[in-house]
Image: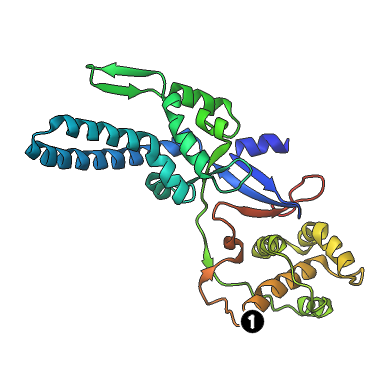
Amino acid sequence: MAQTSEQLDSRIRVVTPENIAFEYRLAGPFWRLPAYLLDLLIRLAIFGLLFFCSLFIFGSLGTFGVGILVLLLGWLVLAWFYGGLFETFWNGQTPGKRIMQLRVISRDGRPVSGLQAVLRNILRVVDALPAYVIAAEFVVPTYLIGLTSAACSSRYQRLGDLVCGTIVIIEERSRMRGVERLDEPEIDAVAALIPATWVPDRSLSNALSKYVDRRKFFGPARRAEIAGHVGSLLVKKLALPPETSYDALLCAAYQRSFHNELGDKTSTRDLQPSPSDRLPKAAQPTLISDSGHELVP
């Protein structure tokens, strides 16, 4: 049932060994179409500039044959390597994708490699089939193969994505706010019990940030239920009293991670990215249990 809900919500998860799930929102064909059209306009503009430069330079020299060869090579480079080069050096983005807030990543959530970026763009030629020739001069791609492949894939992968092991995701906008300050006596009391040498690792810190950000929407009972899955493990690991509040423990661990890191000088009035935004923009951390159930809704 959870798998169906993920497909309907167009989201996938990558789970780390620390049992933290990073959530990505997939970009379907209609999300990707505007980015493709923007990149196409940019390529046409570059080719138009190349055309007029070639016409001026080679026309004045009387070597039109060389000019035509330069134009053909220029269009070949733009058609096959424009996307691959940008996605390699812009971390999975072309100008069109950056404007539309899309990004190409590997299927396992890692950044796309240069080989993946170039190959998936070369295979776009196959995804564009069948193509129709109009007036013996213009070739109009239909992208039926690519659309069919994306429609049959649970991750909206066209043929080039399937071969290269890549997906296209929608980046979430970062929220600008300060580090939360939790001025509650119970949290301070639990924080005093945590060993001074213990500091949460990065994955746990990001998950704690997500929990603290959302806990204000829950009542005490719901907080205890959500925090208990991880809090019970921390109580044992840190040798704390069994009656320790799991909600207060997670908040105290959050303070240990972020307020100590910032020298305890950060005010909620200081605008800066949320600690959870320290992840790649598309990743949304979520605590999950050993059985695979989400702990922070």
Question: Which amino acid type corresponds to the residue marked 1 in the rendered image?
Answer: Asp
**In the figure, 123 relative to 229: above or below?**
above
The reply, left or right, for residue 154 in relation to residue 238 is left
Q: Nearer the viewer, residue 23 or 181?
A: 23
Name the element at disc 1.
Answer: loop
The reply, left or right, for residue 271 in relation to residue 52 is right
The x and y percentages for residue 138 are: 26, 23
Q: What residue is at 16 percent from the left and 42 percent from the top?
A: 53
Q: What residue is at 55 percent from the left and 39 percent from the top?
A: 167
**Quarter occupied by residue 276:** bottom right
Residue under numbered circle 1: 264
The x and y percentages for residue 275 are: 60, 66
Check disc 1: other Cα within 10 Å, few if <14, some if 14-19, many if 20+.
few
**Quarter occupied by residue 226:** bottom right
**In the figure, 227 relative to 198: above or below?**
above
**In the figure, 221 relative to 47: above or below?**
below
- Work out whether residue 217 can be spotted: no
Q: How many marks?
A: 1
Q: Nearer the viewer, residue 91 or 231?
A: 91
Q: Nearer the viewer, residue 201 or 245?
A: 201
In this view, which residue lies farthest toward the right? 242
The x and y percentages for residue 286 are: 69, 53
Instruction: Pick the quarter of the image with the N terminus.
Output: top right
Q: What residue is at 57 percent from the left and 66 percent from the top?
A: 274
The reply, left or right, for residue 215 in relation to residue 34 is right
Q: What residue is at 61 percent from the left and 46 percent from the top?
A: 109
